[in-house]
Amino acid sequence: MARVLLRNLNKNYETFHAVKDVNLEIQDREFVVLVGPSGCGKTTTLRMIAGLEAITSGEILIGDTVVNELPPMDRDIAMVFQNYALYPHMSVRDNMAFGLKMRKFDREEIARRVKIAADILDIEPLLHRKPRQLSGGQRQRVALGRAIVRNPQVFLFDEPLSNLDAKLRVQMRVELKKLHERLGTTAVYVTHDQVEAMTLGDRVVVMKDGWVQQVGDPLELYNAPANKFVAGFIGSPGMNFAAVSFQREGDALLAVNHGLRITVPAPVAARLNGHAGRDATLGIRPEDLSLAGPDDAEGHCFEALVEVIERLGSEILLDVKVGPASMVASVPPTVRTRMRDTIRLALDPERLHFFDAETEVAL
């Protein structure tokens, strides 16, 4: 097992700067997920770690070894791709054994490793089959088995579950987590799915336009996003945003726009003291909104027009219009309302977020 260290990592494609000054230390046995929208540089970063993409500048260390110039086969890594890349004419057993045969392992050691991997993944009954006789989930397990038999220092996963249907994807997420707990191998995982990132990662690296936006454990990113992009990307549904300005009213600080007049809690107001009279973006998560009741303070309530009702069984998502802003509120399935109704919502003042209107950095 080994740590992975990225120092000032950059990747340029002629005039396009794909990865920009990435600095990241992945600890031994840690499961780290790179997440972000398409084109953010996450897969390019993974491919540079693997040696499949040349580095423009910076250093990559696996263990204590600088691997910039090492070919992929000498980096002691195993990679699982979005495309299973199984040899169609070979059995499952031969697919899993192929890499070891190329490295001249003896027959007994190959058989031992294939059996161990098949037992771990519960695919021993499939060893005689060809890939065309397998389901998508079974093929994914074979691809994982091919990586496990290598017994590498680092596993690299490039969106390995994206070709599976939704139910199977959830099942395989659980299996991957169990697999990591059992093997204890350092893992770097790339996905565009923030739910997948939150489920799997010991730490999550959020990327945008080649830059690392924030690194932290899933709950840290959820509860204390560094900027508006992270706040909107992490969480499902995403955080609600509304452009507001700060106004003083006596000792109170208010966040105001055409549909909102929110009293900022005193501890937050003290932190925002220098922002009175300035514009900002208010953020509140859907689950921190509820139907207003008699005990809710006036300064934490507002009116909203119901535009869409999404009944999901365990919850109802109300897509509402609040002044110029669109928001989503997550309410219990017992709530009864209709489209075009005007309802009164209350927010949890302890869960408010504010971001600078220009820099989008959390205030």
Image (cartoon, rainbow, N blue to C red):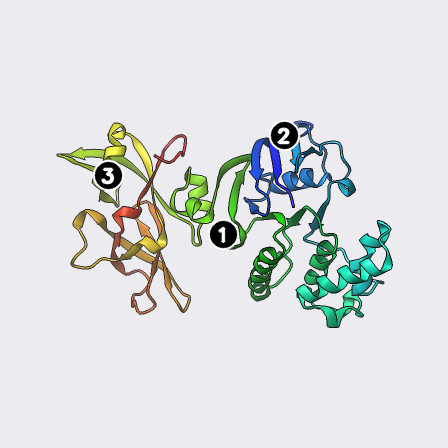
Q: Is 108 above or below relative to 204?
A: below
Which numbered disc, 1 or 2, marks the residue that appears first in the sequence? 2
Neighbourhood count class around disc 3 (C-alpha, 10 Å): few under 14, some 14–19, many 20 upward:
few
Q: Is residue 105 left or right of residue 179?
A: right
Q: CA distance from mark 2 to mark 3?
A: 40 Å
Q: CA distance from mark 1 to mark 2?
A: 26 Å
Q: Inspect the image, locate mark 2, and give the three-letter code of the amino acid beneath it.
A: Asn
Residue tagged 1: 198
Q: Is 76 above or below relative to 147?
A: above
Give yes or no for contact between labels 1 and 2 (Cβ–Cβ under 8 Å): no
Q: Is residue 224 left or right of residue 133?
A: left
Residue 248 on image: x %, y %:
18, 33
Residue at 31% across, 32% down: 279
Residue 275 visible in image:
yes
Residue 260: image quadrant is top left
Residue 308: image quadrant is bottom left
Q: CA distance from mark 1 to mark 3?
A: 29 Å
Q: Inspect the image, locate mark 3, and give the three-letter code of the amino acid beneath it.
A: Pro
Q: Is residue 217 left or right of residue 352?
A: right
Q: Is residue 142 left or right of residue 241?
A: right
Name the outermost residue toward the left. 250
Badge 3 element: helix
Badge 2 element: strand
Residue 32 on image: x %, y %:
56, 46
Q: Inspect the image, locate mark 1, and give the three-letter code of the amino acid beneath it.
A: Met
Residue tagged 3: 267
Viewer-nearest residue: 226 or 292: 226
Residue tagged 2: 10
Which numbered disc, 2 or 3, marks the residue that appears first in the sequence? 2
